[in-house]
Amino acid sequence: MLVLGIETSCDETGVALYSQEHGLEAHVLYSQAALHAEYGGVVPELASRDHVRKLIPLLRSVLTAAGRRREDLDGVAYTAGPGLIGALLAGACAARGLAWSLGIPVLGIHHMEAHLLAPMLEETPPAPPFVALLVSGGHTMLVRVCAVGDYDVLGETRDDAVGEAFDKTAKLLGLGYPGGPALAGIAAQGNPGCYRFPRPMTDRPGLDFSFSGLKTHALTTFRNSPPGREGRADIARAFEEAIVDTLVIKCRRALDTTCLTDLVVAGGVSANRRLREALSRMTAGRGERVYYPRPEFCTDNGAMVALTGALRLQSGERDGVASRVRPRWPLSELSRLDN
Ligand code: KG4
Ligand code: ZN
């Protein structure tokens, strides 16, 4: 079964082809980062319009890259939520129109499930049950994954998502948009131990997170620190270390409380090098395993949507007649796949 995957939930247009027989056949990605950079964040209306502009050319180039024709497709999957409503609708309309014209099934995919399954595109894929840490621009959660589609949310953020905290802190340090990679870049030049930021909610039981205080802490430190690049690098370093420590502590707790030994880390922030190193260290000593997507599939992409679509379409799931995108969509509402 050859499935086309379309991702347009935010500011990346991703299109990919996945087949059961050959795995990932091709994927293309267009980032709108430059378009939004001058506004310091994503402008939803500009995002929707740019998705509309880019989708058809990207669709053509992914088919060419795989040496396939539209008529080879057996199904189409698109991100139906969570995300920006206009951006989601752009992908949904393209996907549903294409599927209708070809007479093939179409299915709306949950964006966070697609992130969660992205490590299954790698050579050594994880197999449930495992604990998943999902860290993106809009979400931060720990999930017990019993099977594909059987998700038990163990903890989530009460305010900012980790990626959002990176983006907001980068902005106040004058690092521009998108902030995560920029902040991580300058943190590498900072002196460790120059400042110590709190590790929020680690001193009490439970698996919830809170990151909005860290951003305020960074702002206060910034106002009181000597100006210049060096001072900013030290703050970035302290901020990143606090985030990484907090996530490591909560992952440890989640593995211990569930008695599971496999950890999957996905979403944009899972590209963070310091986080990957710390989680690999934390699990290695105990014979546990940690799985990540390759860096390009940590952030939004079409490949993860095509893979998730292939799994669900294969098991017979299809969209109904009415198109439904869901800007908000709890992960726990998904149905379990038993095959
Ligand atoms: O998964 P994603 O592409 O989009 C959402 O679903 O939200 O995640 C984007 C987020 C942004 O907040 C971005 O700053 C963050 O992931 N990010 C990073 C890194 N690369 C991307 N944060 C920290 N370090 C990175 N290397
Ligand atoms: Zn995402």
Image (tube, grey):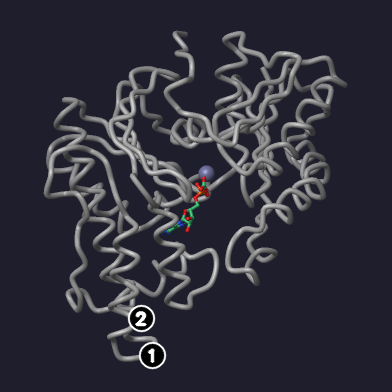
Q: Check the image and report above or below for 48 versus 313.
A: below
Q: Secondary structure at mark 1?
A: loop
* Residue 204 location (% of width, % of height): 12, 44
Q: Secondary structure at mark 2?
A: helix
Residue sitting at x 71%, y 43% = 86
Amino acid type at circle 1 is: Gly
C-beta proximity under 8 Å, tags 2 and 1: yes
Amino acid type at circle 2 is: Arg
Estimate the spatial distance between the alpha carbons at disc 2 and disc 1, rounded to whole Å: 7 Å
Q: Check the image and report above or below for 1 versus 207.
A: above
Q: Check the image and report above or below for 32 versus 122.
A: below
Number of other residues with Cα within 10 Å of mark 1, as a class: few under 14, some 14 to 19, many 20 or more: few
Q: What residue is pinned by disc 1?
A: 228
Q: Is residue 132 left or right of residue 302?
A: left
Q: Is residue 324 left or right of residue 227?
A: right
Q: What residue is pinned by disc 2?
A: 232
Q: Is residue 215 left or right of residue 117?
A: left
Locate the N terminus and report the quarter of the image it occupies.
top right
Residue sitting at x 60%, y 13% = 314
Q: Which residue occupies the foreground of this view, 164 or 150?
A: 164
